Image (cartoon, rainbow, N blue to C red):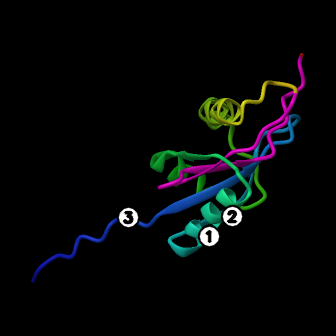
Amino acid sequence: MAKHNKPPPTVAVALRYDGKNAPKVTAKGEDALAEQICRLAREHDVPLYEDARMARVLSHIELGDEIPENLYRAVAEVIAFAYLLSGKVCGVGAEATASDSSASALRQLPAPDSD
């Protein structure tokens, strides 16, 4: 009996970051839904960040939940990527989205408050 090697599903995760609390998962999906999340991001000029492993990890977080503290650094790198691509600087705000073929998605990224 021959084994069929199917490619892993495409995963997309959208996050929202208000600059005060940890980013929250606002959308996630596989395959067709992931493609729709990415399509909407492109339609709204939201940069896409590709990281399949991060998308997989983030996809296990419940909708509406904040990302856990152990993911802060990885997500901060995505936020920095969004700032770079959008030409924005801290204090101005930016947006980013990502999925598995377009890995984790970040939406509305105002700069965090300074301590």
Cα separation, mark 3 vs mark 1, equals 17 Å
Cα separation, mark 3 vs mark 2, equals 22 Å
Mark 3 vs mark 2: in front:
2
Q: Residue 40 carries which label?
A: 2
Tag 3 residue = 8
The image shows residue 63 at horizontal and vertical percentages of: 73, 61
Which residue sits furthest top? 115
**Magenta region:** 92-114
Q: Quadrant of residue 59?
A: bottom right
Check if mark 1's residue and mark 2's residue have beta carbons within 8 Å.
Answer: yes
The image shows residue 48 at horizontal and vertical percentages of: 60, 48
Residue at the spot 83% in from the left edge and 35% down from the top edge: 93
Residue at the spot 23% in from the left edge and 70% down from the top edge: 5
Q: Quadrant of residue 75?
A: top right
What amino acid is at disc 3?
Answer: Pro
Does residue 74 show up? Answer: yes
Left or right: residue 2 versus residue 51 is left
Magenta segment main secondary structure? loop
What amino acid is at disc 1?
Answer: Gln
Per the image, is 27 magenta? no
Please, what secondary structure does the residue beneath circle 1 have?
helix
Q: Which mark is residue 36?
A: 1
Residue 6 vertical placement versus 20 (above, below) = below
